[in-house]
Every structure is written in C-alpha cells, then in structure tokens.
Image (cartoon, helix red, strand yellow):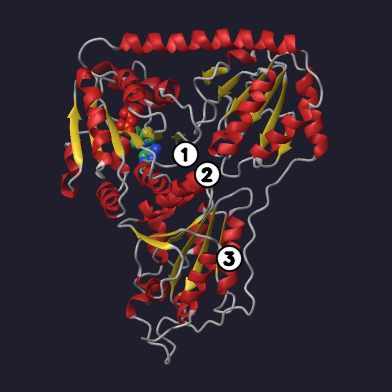
Amino acid sequence: MKNYLDGGEAILEAFRKLKIDYIMSSPGSEWSPIWEALARQTLENRAGPTFVESWHETLAVNMATGYTLMTGRPQAVLLHAGVGVLQGSMGIHGALQNEVPMVVMSGESQTLGENPDLDIEQQWYGGLTVGGIERFVEPVTKWARAVTSPYTLYESVIRAGEMAQRAPKGPIYLNVALEHMLHDWTPPESPREVPPAPVMQPRPQDVETVAELLRKAKSPVIVTETAGRDPKAFSALQELADLFAIPVINGRASAYANFPTDHPLYLGIGRYKALDDADLVLLVGGRAPWYPPRRRPTRGKIVAIHDHPLKEHMVYQNLHVDLYLEGDIAESLMLLIAAAKSAKIEPATVTARRQRWTREHESYVAELRAEREKAQNGSAIDPLSLLGALGEAMPADTIYVDETITHSPLIRQHLPQTTPQSFFRGSGGLGQGIGTALGIKLAAPQRPVALLIGDGSFLYNPVIQALGASQRHDLPIVIVILNNKKYEAMRKGHVHHYPDGASASKGLHFGVTIDGPDYEQLGSHFGFHGERVEYRAELDVALRSALTATKEGRTAILNVVVNR
Ligand SMILES: Cc1ncc(C[n+]2csc(CCOP(=O)(O)OP(=O)(O)O)c2C)c(N)n1
C-alpha cells in the first residue's frame, strides 16, 4: 500500500485543523484523493472527520446546514464539479440567507488531457464543464474562488473555514483542480492550530447609551426574530426581559425558538400591539420585522442588536433603526445587562410592568387555547387540533423543523417552544426541510426531531434520497405531512388579486391541486413506519406510535389529512 501525501491529504488535514466533524458529500470523480486520505485515516485509526454520503446534493448541503444550526460549527460539503454545485445551489443559497457557515468544495480538471505526463479521465474534457463554475456560484455564496495551486491548497481550505465563521457567516466555495489534489503535498513545518473565530462586541459607549435608554424607558418592548439560534442569546434575552420586566414579541419573520413561549412576558408572534405605547424597542436579531416596511411600528426609539443587521441578500430592507448595537447577539445582550444593572431602577416600576404584561400573556394564552378548542369540532383534522396533539404527545425537548407555508403562522403561534433550539424554520426555496431535520438529528441524537411539512413542500424534497440517508446514517425522525391536497398558498394568492375573477367564481384553479402519492407508504422501502391519519381521534395514538418507531431507530411518516 502506497502512502500518497498529496492534495487530498492536505484538504483532510485542513478539515481536521478546522475541527470539522463531517464531510457531507454527494459523489464526484474528483474526490478520489480525499477518499484515499479517508481510507488511510480509517486504516491508521486516526481522528478526523466522518464521511457522510448522500444521494443528492441538496441533501448534503441541507444536512450540513442542520448540523451547524445546532452546533454553530461549520462543516465541509464536497460536491461534484460544476453540475453538482448547480444541483446543490439552492441549499447553498439558503445557507447564505440564513447565515450558516460552511466550506463547500468541488473540483474540475485544469489540464483537460493536454498534459502528456498526467492521464486525466476523458469525461473532464467537454462533459462536465459548465464553463467556469465560480460564475454560477458567486451569487449564492459569501465568497467563491478557485484555489490557485497545490502549494496554496492547505491554507486556502483553512482560510475558507475561518472566513465562513466571520460575520456575516455563510458558505465559502472553493474550486479545487483535480491536478492540485493529485499533486504532492509537503505539510507545513509547524502547522498552526486554528483559533476560534473572535466574538465581536459593540463599543462600550454604545452599550452605555442603550443602557441609559433602557433605564429611562417607561414602556420598553423586545422584538426578536433570530436571537434564539444561539442558546446563549436565548438565555441572555430571558435574563434581560426578566430584569426589567420587558415583554417579548417574536417578529413576523421569526425563524427560531427565541424566548420561552410559556414565559409570563411572552406576547406572541407578530402581535405588535404592545408597540403602540412603547418608548423603546429592542430589535434583537431582526431581518424583516415590520410590514409594510414603510410603517414605523412605534413612536419610541428602535435599537437593533445584531452582528449583521443589514442583509445584502435583500434588495430592500427598512428596519427604522435609530441606534445599532452591532456585535454578537448574546455578547451584546450580556454587556447590556451588565451596564443596565449598574443603575438602580425603581422596583415598583418593574413590578407594575410585570403585572401588566403577565395579564396580557395570560389573556393571549387563553385566546390560543380557545382557538384550539374551537377547532376540536367534527371528526376531521383541523391543523390546530394537530398542533394541540403535538403539544400533548411530543416530549418537551422535541426539536421542530417547519417547512409549511399557509400553516406556518399557526404552527409558530401554537407550538410550545420552551427550550433553546426547539424550533427552526429556514428561509429560501422549498425542498430543504428533510435534509435540515436530518442534520439537526445528527447533531442532537438524543432529542426527538419532528419535521412539519406541507404536502406541496414535501414533494420538493429529495424524498427517497433523504429516507436513504436517514436509514444509512441512523437518523430516525418523525415527518408529519400536513396534507391539504393542494398548494393552498397559490390559491390564496390568486384569489387575493382576482377576488371576483374567472377562477374564483367558477372554482377553476390552475397550479393548486396536488394528486399526491400515499405518502405514508414511501418509507416502506426502508422498513420505516408510516400511517395515514384522517380523523382527529386517531392523532394522539398515531403520534405516539411514530415516536416509538423513532426510538426503535425507524423514521416515521405521518400523512395527516387536514381540512384546510
Ligand atoms: C423551490 C420552490 N419552488 C416553488 C415555490 C413556490 N411556492 C411557495 S409556497 C408553495 C406551495 C407549497 O405547498 P404546501 O407545502 O402544500 O403548502 P400550502 O400552500 O398548501 O400551505 C409553492 C409551490 C417555492 N417557494 N420554492
């Protein structure tokens, strides 16, 4: 057995230095140098990343996304040449939008058969080229370049991992020539340990200014959309809210469990009423909280707390911000807490505020309960009774992934989110939910993971490939399909613009009906559990059986036929 010390080893060693746990990959013939290095790693019993094979590029990228959402640490994604990257590009774009760091790589041949001393396979000439992959990848990544030589390869990969973790976090793409990976590699004489990315802080005087506003504010309110992605920010937000009795509202584009929904200061999602008489709004991790954006939601000052408040991926954004605290969210919140604590605030003021908002919280919770009870009517399944049943049957540490459309506002309002990292909703194109859920399960094998997904959205996913990955990598999850047998969003949108048009008056719709397969049977090829659930009375048992299947290592697909 020959020990090749080549570019493949350089990349794997760079991954080790970056403390990458997984290489998520959908195969391509350029990766033999990496596979050779991985084979040596196994034979020599060396520590290093595990290779996770996928049958589809979207899945490979989404699994990296899910894993990083849980751990915060970037992973590697190896795709194939130009074609594989194009296939995975929507997932990569999703990672860009959601600021998920990752190192994405693919390779092409540079010599294309013209080097008489290097026998490159024929397919590289003409077959696989997309005419320079960086042209396609650049808009969907934070940074995309070709590695310049075998001599710059090792540090280029490390630098990619380091860049991915700087704000704004996101995917970095490297195009590595096959020839560079096959080339000899001499490791650096004294390789450096890669330091963790620094945690950025706002300036002390800016923190002090906001602390002063907070002390003086009579009616401060917190609005958040993404704070809870970091468990430290989830805790810090709770501490800040508790300290001053500030109510917390999840913004309309809220995508994570940001604040315990059973906390007496929690006022719901997109319910901005408390902003009417607010004199200070702390917008924590906001992306697009106000709609229409021109409408300023408050007469008070708006302070944005975020490491990256202004999003390049949006063509327009109007946050109405008066002051920025720019830095890591958890860090900024903790600095703010420390600064604000140093001055006394009248305990009676805090107590009065807490009482006011607790009453508001209680009436909000009662309203939700009444809505759910109203839905317990007849034998068919209203989405609200499904949400009630999930709340009852699923353990408190369940992680929910949401890829629904018209049901999402209900889900985010009614599903309990009491612990950090218990809810994730990605933004970007449809078809990424199952892979994201599998990546999350890989990072949190002890916690139940439930994907809530519309029938239309489900069909955009690489379903067979994802079920294969679930089986092969031992990642059992519960998939709950909210099956309304249609793209309701399309119907709603059509009727919104043409309320008395030809379609609405005659019920003649295009692009709405879904004549889907028996979704519950799709897992049978893998020995998975599946059940069609049509009646409300069956929900509880069905959910519990699904959960039991996952405990036995089998993914469960519940095809829940909902009445809207
Ligand atoms: C990749 C991609 N293609 C198309 C769309 C457009 N789209 C948005 S919502 C939607 C319908 C999804 O249907 P379903 O999950 O059943 O939800 P419902 O509308 O019934 O609530 C579609 C097709 C999209 N967002 N992403």
Discs 2, 1 touching: Cβ within 8 Å: yes
- Tag 2 residue: 97
Residue at disc 1, secondary structure? loop
The crowd level at tag 1 (other Cα within 10 Å; few <14, some 14-19, many 20+) is some
Residue sitting at x 19%, y 37%: 530
Discs 1, 3 touching: Cβ within 8 Å: no
Q: Position of residue 356 (x, y in %)?
A: 62, 8
The disc at residue 348 is none
Determine whether the beta carbon of the residue marked 3 sits less than 8 angstroms from the nearest atom of ligand 1. no
- Tag 1 residue: 427
Q: Where is residue 88 in the image (x, y as percent from the top left)?
A: 40, 55
Quadrant in the rendering for residue 195: bottom right
Determine whether the beta carbon of the residue marked 2 sits less than 8 angstroms from the nearest atom of ligand 1. no
Mark earlier in primary sequence (1, 3): 3
Q: Where is residue 488 in the image (x, y as percent from the top left)?
A: 32, 26
Residue at disc 2, secondary structure? helix
Residue at disc 3, secondary structure? helix
Quadrant in the rendering for residue 499: top left
Nearer the observer, 315 or 58 = 58
The amino acid marked with disc number 1 is Ser
